[in-house]
Image: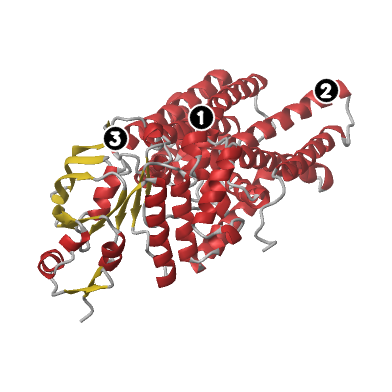
Amino acid sequence: MIEAKNVSKRYGETLVVDGVTLSLPVGGITSIIGPNGAGKSTLLSMMSRVMPMSSGNVLVDGLDVTTTPGDMLAKRLAILRQDNHITARLTVRELVTFGRYPHTKGRPTVQDREHVERAIEHMGLSALADRFLDEMSGGQRQRAFVAMVLCQDTDHVLLDEPLNGLDLKHAVSMMKRLRHAADTLGKSFVLVLHDINFASCYSDHIVAMRDGKVAFQGRPEDIMRPDVLRAIYELDISVQQIEGDWIATHYR
Amino acid sequence: MSASAPPVSPLRPLLVLGCVAVAFMALFMLVDVSGPWDFVLPFRGKKVATALLVGYAVAVSTVLFQTVTGNRVLTPAIMGFDYLYVLIQTCLVFFLGSTTVAGLDPRFLFGAEVIIMVAFSAMLHGWLFGMARGNVHLLLLTGVVMGVLFRSLSSFIQRVIEPNEFIFLQDRFFASFNDPEHDLLLLSVVLTLGVSVLGLRLLRACDVLVLGREAAINLGVDYQRTVSWVLALVAILVAVSTALVGPVTFLGLLVANIAYAVMRTYKHAFVLPAAALIAAIALVAGQFILERVFRLDTNPRVIIEFVGGAVFIAMLMRKATR
């Protein structure tokens, strides 16, 4: 369980995240949506202790992220941010093996190797496992990073825009894989998503942010309503139920 | 596919490098001996030991610095270390006079230089790094500015100094590998080995730092603490090598990038010894070829710096066009 209590982030006079109190459900997929600059990524970074918060605190399974030793948290919570740039040349397998570091401190055992191969296979990268990251497309690279985070084998997995740079096919397969991991392995995913229809179709819970605050939260059918979406995005969005999913059309 | 497959084992290139290094050291020690062996061997042995030590310090400090900054065209020189060394020397001559400085116990001078340089970097890193909350770029920027400050201060003092004193001073900036005092060498070896043993604990955490700050934090590395320790290590190594033979600018850049290319792995356990061996080869082989083959009385560092500088420019150009 991840609980944020009155969390704020301030840059000088600007409040990016404004006193967010939030408790995220255990298990399943929670999506954070909202317009640019709503503070979604910042909140995610603070929840995962990658960015220090200006005030408030975050508890992960009751552990305060600012005071708990980093290696202890790394076994419970994994985060993948956007824009992962690495100067060294790494193969997919080398990158994914890093996911075992919290458990092995750099000395992977046979079991760890199996973990790595499973994560690579899960992300559909088996054929590319020995390929260098800089010889792959952006989408393939993105999947390799997600494989690393899955390989960390934590209860909580936080992904900042995991669909970034993925084409339709790979976006769908990424969401299916995350859904599968949530359902079969009992992991809790927190995703920052821009595509509200992906959020609607695959999430159990949606948190909508606006101006650094949580504007709405609830099940997809609670959020996917024209009045709610207008309040979030300042846009007239019609919502239709298609084959059981709530789909927003916002292209005109 | 075969081009992108990783090599069988990184141990093989390491072994080859080791053999080449030993071969050049043996050549340097044994070829062309015209005096008595009991004089020539210790005399040349000291040169080889100095080259090994300096090569090691420069290579290791550069690779670690590049890991921390996530940038492969930087060297610790950007933090203004070499100009701090120049400033210390200039101040000594200016305030004490060349005769006093020449009469000072070199061990004392060496110790003082190392302490001042380490203290400076501890202040810069500890204080600023804490304040900048682990922002390495802010740290670098401050280092660059401090470097300019040191350079301006030294060139100002050099302008008002007496010409004879200036010539004495200039001589000291280009201290070669040939004249380090025996005691200094021993002191440096002990210091370098000491910090290296302490640094071994950080080896695997350094591998994770290659992924960048956020990924390292995610994997449970205490980023701020690890980076501070690594930078302290770098400061001590640079201080030792600079106090021993003076500033070396491009050697580190050259050997670090050759090491990455040869080893084709991110693992510091392989890259660091490879870089150190390449540096040793460059220094010993350079000295050997210059002295014995071309019979030139030039300092090999001039040539190494020239090649290193050319590589640096080439790397910048390649980065710019990408």
Front label number (3 vs 2): 3
Q: Where on the picture, by quarter, is residue B310?
A: bottom right
Q: Residues within 10 Å of mark 3 (few under 14, many from 20)?
A: some
The amino acid type found where label 2 is placed reads: Phe
Indicate the colouring scheme: secondary structure
Q: Which residue is mark 3?
A: A61
Q: Which element carries disc 3, helix, strand or loop?
A: loop
Pointer 2 indicates a residue of which chain? B
Residue A55's x, y, as percent? 17, 39
Pointer 3 indicates a residue of which chain? A
Number of labelled discs? Answer: 3
- The residue depicted at 28 percent of the width and 58 percent of the height is A203
Taking the image as shown, residue B280 lies to the left or right of residue A122, namely right
Q: Which residue is mark 2?
A: B39
Label placed on residue B236 = 1
Depth order, front residue of B41/B95: B41
The quarter of the picture where the N terminus of chain B appears is: bottom right
Residue A105's x, y, as percent? 51, 34
Residue B136, visible in the rendered structure: yes
Q: How far apart in space, not on screen, are marks 1 and 3 (Cα)?
A: 42 Å
Specify which label sits upstream in the sequence, 2 or 1: 2
Depth order, front residue of B313/A96: A96
Q: Which element carries disc 1, helix, strand or loop?
A: helix
Pointer 1 indicates a residue of which chain? B
The amino acid type found where label 3 is placed reads: Asp
Depth order, front residue of A107/B212: A107
